[in-house]
Amino acid sequence: MSRTAQRHLLTIDDLGVEGVQRILRLTDSFVEVSERRIPKVPVLRGRTVAWLFYEDSTRTRLSFETAAKRLSADSMNFSVGSSAVNKGESLRDTVQTIEAMGVDAIVVRHKSAGAPKQITQWLDASVINAGDGWHAHPTQALLDCYTLRARLGGIDGRRIAIVGDIKHSRVARSNIAAFTALGAEVVLVAPPTLLPPSLVPFDVTVSHSIDEVIGEVDVVYLLRMQLERMHEALVPSLREYTATYGLTAARARRLGPDTVVMHPGPMNRGVEVAADVPQMPNAVVTDQVRNGVAVRMAVLFDLLATEADPVFGDDGEETDA
Ligand code: ASP
């Protein structure tokens, strides 16, 4: 395995179909590593990865940190809340300060769409987008593709409903790109107020009725109502939203036995999904989280490993490349 020309991971479109497939193949190896008694390999020893999260995160941040540790990379923790950002330091000065200490990659989450791309202009380090505004969340889409492929055997030709607050969702945008690139048909299910102003860039169909699509799809992908991004009332009330678009217990009973239920988290149980639905056998929410670590190992490896790095043997022992 060698370092590719890819230096940053900003969007699924940048990766392209081949890049997505390369990451999914690499992930198979890192799932195997993650299942070992000692789930650690020395492939990124000596590399340093910094975390720069300007927005809250539980899964993505912990998952990247675990991935870096399992690859033996060093990490530089940066907490925006207790940093000189509070003294007015700019994004540019902040990232250049971090780079001056010596980092190979910066994993960044920011509320502004385009912030990770902007950072690539200022640094030599690789930049990984861990979510920028409404724009993109490529590692979420990769872990969702991996999880679906593992569950369904493939994505090509599958029908996937993405349900809920699509307007504010970077997950929806990245998943539409990844699912359609791998040959799925995507239907967006939402009230008109929760759809993006233009659907022209997306190869999707739209439905305003979850009841019409629920029996017709292989996957129901639920999204959280992102109230932190809403500045006006886009639905009459959350209760009404649940009644019209939520995966209630009654609707869940109408799903086919093999229909997969997904959610990127954090879930608002009782709003977009009934409290018990994520525990159903066809819900893969925990698999998504578990696979997220191996996918992020694959992404870090893809960007940072070089020909000169040791590769890993079956027993986890370092071997010569
Ligand atoms: N965790 C995902 C994100 O960061 C989804 C969400 O917050 O609803 O975009």
Image (cartoon, rainbow, N blue to C red):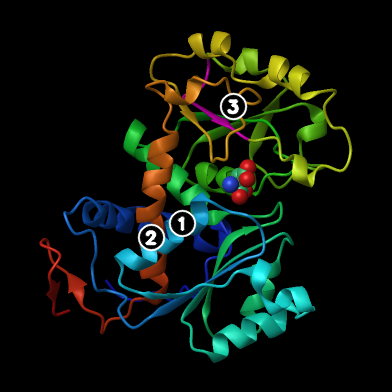
Position of the N terminus by quadrant: bottom left
Residue 23 is at least partly visible in this image: yes
**Circle 2 sits in a helix, a strand or a loop, which is it?**
helix
Depth check, front residue: 127 or 48 = 48
Badge 1 density bin: few <14, some 14–19, many ≥20, Cα 10 Å:
few
Is residue 119 toward the left or the right of residue 19 in the image?
right
**Neighbour tally class for label 2: few under 14, some 14-19, many 20 plus, Cα within 10 Å:** some
Q: Position of residue 17 (x, y in %)?
A: 46, 54
Q: Is 102 contained in the magenta span? A: no
Note whether 300 is above or below 292 in the view shown. Answer: below
| Magenta stretch, residue numbers | 216-223
Seen at 26% across and 80% down, the residue is: 309
Residue on which the image places disc 2 = 66
Distance from Cα at disc 2 to Cα at disc 1:
6 Å
Q: Taking 301 as reference, is 155 above or below it?
A: above
Determine whether the residue tagged by mark 1 lies in a helix, strand or loop.
helix
Residue at mark 1: 62
Check disc 1 and give the amino acid type.
Leu
What amino acid is found at the position of numbered circle 2 in the picture?
Thr
Horizontal placement of 201 versus 251: left or right?
A: right
Q: Are marks 3 and 1 in contact (CB under 8 Å)?
A: no
Question: Disc 3 to disc 2, how far (Cα)?
Answer: 26 Å
Q: Are marks 2 and 1 in contact (CB under 8 Å)?
A: yes
Residue denoted by label 3: 269
Residue at left offset 63%, top offset 13%:
212
Judged left or right of residue 101, residue 225 is right
Residue at x 84%, y 32% (from the top left corner): 234
Q: Residues within 10 Å of mark 3 (few under 14, many from 20)?
A: some
Return the disc, 3 or 2, that comes first in the chain's sequence. Answer: 2
**Figure check: 166 above or below 305:** above
